[in-house]
Image (tube, rainbow, N blue to C red):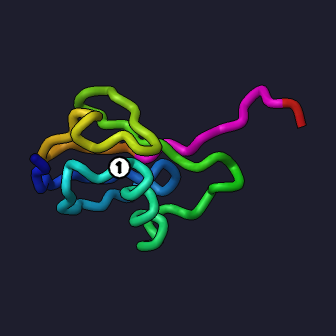
Amino acid sequence: MANVINVTFLNPTTDQSMEVQVDDSMTATAVLNELISSGFIPDNAAQGGYSLLVKTTQKQISGSQTLAEGGAVSGSPIRVIPATDAGRPS
């Protein structure tokens, strides 16, 4: 059963934070789409997108993984992690 939790998202480039109430059954993709549409983070799909790191559990989630699968509970800080192409030949 899904739970509504209060979490804090942390922006990777601006050090801004956003406290929100979310359903822990939301997928990483759904959360990231909401953060992009609200202007909290820019759309970086061309650079590979983002994943989320639940800081209290140190679990990284992406795609169809849910906040609950990452161990997010009320009070969890969640860092947005930009994907990188480090080491990829151009």
From the top left corner, tell me how far across and down residue 34 is, in percent.
40, 66
Q: Specify whether 7 is left or right of 11.
A: left
**Magenta span: chief secondary structure:** loop
For the point 36% across and 51% down, the residue is 10
Magenta stretch holds residue 90:
no
Query: Which amino acid is tagged 1?
Result: Thr
75 or 34: which is nearer to us? 34
> Is 78 rendered above or below residue 34?
above
**Image mark count:** 1
Where is residue 43 drawn, in percent x and y? 58, 62
For label 1, the residue is 27
What residue sits 39% from the left and 48% below the top?
28
**Can you say which quadrant of the picture contains the C terminus?**
top right
**Tag 1, which secondary structure?**
loop
What range is drawn magenta here?
80-88
Magenta span has 87? Answer: yes
**Which quadrant would residue 32 be assigned to in this image?**
bottom left
The structure residue drawn at horizontal position 28% and vertical position 34%, both measured from the top left corner, is: 70
- Describe residue 7's horizontal placement relative to residue 87 as left or right: left
